Amino acid sequence: VIGVTDLTRLSASEIASAIASGEVSAVEVAQVHLDRIAAVDESVHAFLYVDREGALAAARAVDARRARGERLGSLAGVPLALKDVFTQRGVPTTCGSRILEGWRPPFDSTVVGRLRDAGVVILGKTNMDEFAMGSSTENSAYGPTHNPWNLGRIPGGSSGGSSAAVSSYEAPLGIGTDTGGSIRQPAAVTGVVGVKPTYGGVSRYGLVAFSSSLDQAGPLARSVLDAALLHEVIAGHDPLDSTSIDAPVPPVVEAARITDVTGLRIGVVKELSGEGYQAGVEQRFREAVELLAKLGADVIEVSCPHFVYALPAYYLIAPSECSSNLARFDGMRYGLRVGDDGTRSTEEVMALTREAGFGPEVKRRIMLGTYALSSGYYDAYYGQAQKVRTLITRDFDRAFESVDVLVSPTTPTTAFTIGERVDDPMAMYLADLCTIPANLAGNAAMSVPCGLAPEDGLPVGLQIMAPTLADERVYRVGAAVEAALGDAWGHPLLEEAPSL
Amino acid sequence: MTNVAETSALLPYSEAVADYDPVIGLEVHVELSTASKMFCACSTVFGAAPNTQVCPICLGLPGSLPVANKAAVDSTIKIGLALNCSIAEWCRFARKNYFYPDMPKNYQISQYDEPLCTDGWLDVDVDTQDGPRTFRVGIERVHLEEDTGKTLHIGGATGRIHGADYSLVDYNRAGIPLVEIVTKPVPGTGELAPEVARAYVTELREICRTLGVSDVRMEQGSLRCDANVSLAPLGASEWGKRTETKNVNSLRSIERAVRYEIERQAGILAAGGRVVQETRHWHEETGVTTPGRSKEEAQDYRYFPDPDLVPLAPSREWVEGLRASLPELPAARRKRLTKEWALSPRDMDALVNAGALDSVEATVAAGAPPAEARKWWLGELARHANETATEVSALPIGPADVARVVELVAQGRLNDQLARQVIEGVLAGDGSPDEVVAARGLAVVSDDSALGEAVDEAISANPEIAEKVRTGKIAAAGALVGAVMKATRGQADAARVRELIFDRLGVSG
């Protein structure tokens, strides 16, 4: 490691061991990343807020602990980009929305608390689609984030700020949230690893809710092992979240070190391919499946017949929950307040605040959800969608009777052009076609890079899905693919990205 | 067009119930006295400075999540069991969505179509000229929810949000566990409807108090009641349109509000009008109800299961454990004590209404005969409580003190008058009964030599009365006894004084 001139190119595990051994200080590491952000974020716009002082203070604390001879955790001193949907005491938290502009939460989310305890250095808060609603980060009230592979392309969404920060070497690690694919799709289109843990695997306390039954926090990293190390730090039961699972964290780090898939049964989901899928995406996906077979896995085709209804069910359940979750943003207690001139009623001020504070996509989903929950429509919409959700869960259960993991492309296409789909919500929603089923059923899923699409030279992601609480399987398969492809290419995929 | 509903004169009560049959229904909210709130660890103590018992969770800050309080679930199940309900094996919390500044999240976590307890009943007794009558009130559901904050609207004429200059919100109450107990419609109470309504809430309050699940203080809002009333012409096969009267915050108000609604609705119907189904507000000072939200403005609450909370699935062992832990319920206890103490139902009512049942039972347990215990608690002590505006149970005298006074009287060491002085001393904080007796030198004097002088003085000071007694008007002796008692500051043994007087005057009592 000594002799590497650019510390931003190191993996999280390399940084942690360099700090632990005293080769570099945590402050040095934080500083080079802050410098990198200063150098490139004007073009990438991954960050909404850079917490320079907080980051350096956290780094100094790690150095002090090391100086005292304390044992450091596996990621102590490693910088991280945090999606701006998590509360962090005293640090602005906007969720990409005007309505929360200026709000500094008085409490830490559980994820932030665990990162702090582990000595992870939080560099700042990253851009996102407003309240995590979107697949391109264009729905942020603070302007879009750009894909480091091609600044004219979207970095995915809603965790596009974190995926862009990791892929542009502004941070080795990122935290995102995944409600319908918001970690995996950005990871896929920026050529990094992203994991949605089993629902309930990571506490939602302090994660500003979009759709409570679907939201799940997870890691973004440039390698499967780094993702596993971060997963291990943030996961585990939290008494502050009743939907958090009271079970041991799956052995993800151990699994990420196994690069053997011999005898694993891998199911290719028949329904997640064909019409609407970019040719280069399908090609790289097929090659990845062939690679897995060559590595000794048993590959079979599996049918999940109800997956075709996942998208419409999702667009009833998520908006329904969001219409209720976002009701609290009314200008009465925190954030934006509009029209309070002493002549208007409370209701008028609430309405004006929401009118001015929410962007068009958020309003669209609030209206959709309000309608779907209305008396007389509930059974036909929300109720029906919940039944579809059950059927999708059963599809997974049946499939996992015969296979250990399921695979598909992560997204039907590579990163699209900024502005291309903003006026066509349906086209935008299709970006999450392959990722939504895992959210509806709650199981674990990963996106791992599997090459560049020949027609546009942009990254393609392989999605690996495992049963609930078997998160380690996605790491085992992901690590095998990563290792085999790395050998074939002679370098990590990200090194093919243009340098900024 | 004038609104018949708001202009018709009231129909006098006796006429109203002669022509119309009321159906009542009651919705009672009970704030549980758990140490912490429903979904967070904040304190529930009443009366703290505004917005000091709050945290990110009960303020609904972005990112915060609720976790259900098990003690509150236990309390709700206990109430359900005491009301003979079935306890759900699986149920969920639901969100009730509407915008109001006292709700931090703009939705209330409540229960909707899956309440924790359903389908029970409670028998209540109402005193009539023909003796007590029992009515069975069906219980539709008992469910658990969180309370809202409290708003104070400043300025404006109505004290309500519309027209106010500004409003203050106190979120201390937000998130306090609240149990909602809803009756089935109660028909067939006739003219007794107001009394049945009152008796039901009274009994429910006693049950909650006995279970130890709530302070049930209506004046502090820990027990709140809405009363539904509808009227139909006598013998009609269908019930009429009902109104729901809110803000009924004392037992007396419940009776008054139901009675008022019967008179008001009967007035409308008698004038050929139609009752509007609506929410109405009770006004304690004026004794009337006025319209609130009408059905046209009724909100669509868009209930759906709260995805932040896991379902409640009380196991049968859990429920049976709670059932086994239930204390003796008020009705059973009253029945037992009525029998043990050989009381009439009306005697028992008097004890319950005075809030003295616990004190009397404890006094009896401390050795006093029930009749003596009742006499003191319902007499001297109830009067003192009334004068000092406290509850009998809160007086600075305990059942053991009262039992000791009763014992001293039984031993002849005190008479009634002296006993009252001892009680006054204890109430004044002068110590235990024995300490008061010692300090004030209170003891019955029955020694003839000490009394003889006083008797002689009384006779010579009242020659005319003495003469009457001598000539056979025995009853006149009372005045002489009184004079002796006065002279001895009440310490004389009155019976012995009487004997001495007759002795001196040569008559036989």
Image (tube, coloured by chain):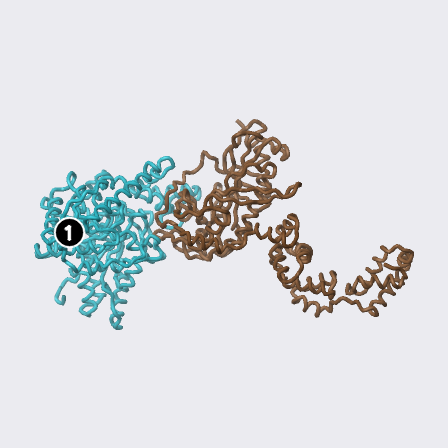
Chain colours: A cyan, B brown
With A190 as the anchor, is B211 left or right in this view? right
Q: Across the whole image, how many numbered discs are drawn on residues?
A: 1
Q: Is residue A462 visible?
A: yes
Residue A14 vertical position relative to residue A167 in the rendered view, above or below? below
Seen in the image, is A85 located left or right of residue A44? right
Residue A202 percent location from the top left of the image: 29, 55
Callout 1: SS? strand
Q: Residue B415: x, y in percent?
A: 74, 62
The chain letter for the residue carrying disc 1 is: A
Q: Which residue is rendered at x = 91% and y = 60% of the image? A: B463
Amino acid type, label 1: Pro
- Near-viewer residue (B183 or B460): B183
Q: Farthest residue in the bottom direction?
A: A68
Residue closest to the eye, A306 or B119: B119
Question: Can residue A77 be seen from the camera position used here?
Answer: no
A335 horizontally vs A50: left or right: right
Q: Nearer the viewer, residue A327 or A224?
A: A224
Identify the image quadrant of the N terminus of chain A: bottom left
The picture places residue A496, in percent across and down from the top left corner, at 11, 53
* Tag 1 residue: A449
* Coordinates of residue A259 in the picture (x, y in percent): 14, 58
Q: Residues within 10 Å of mark 1 (few under 14, many from 20)?
A: many
Up the image or down, B263 lies above or below B85; here it is: above
Q: Looking at the rendering, in which quadrant would you find the C terminus of chain A?
A: bottom left
Q: Is residue A24 left or right of residue B505?
A: left
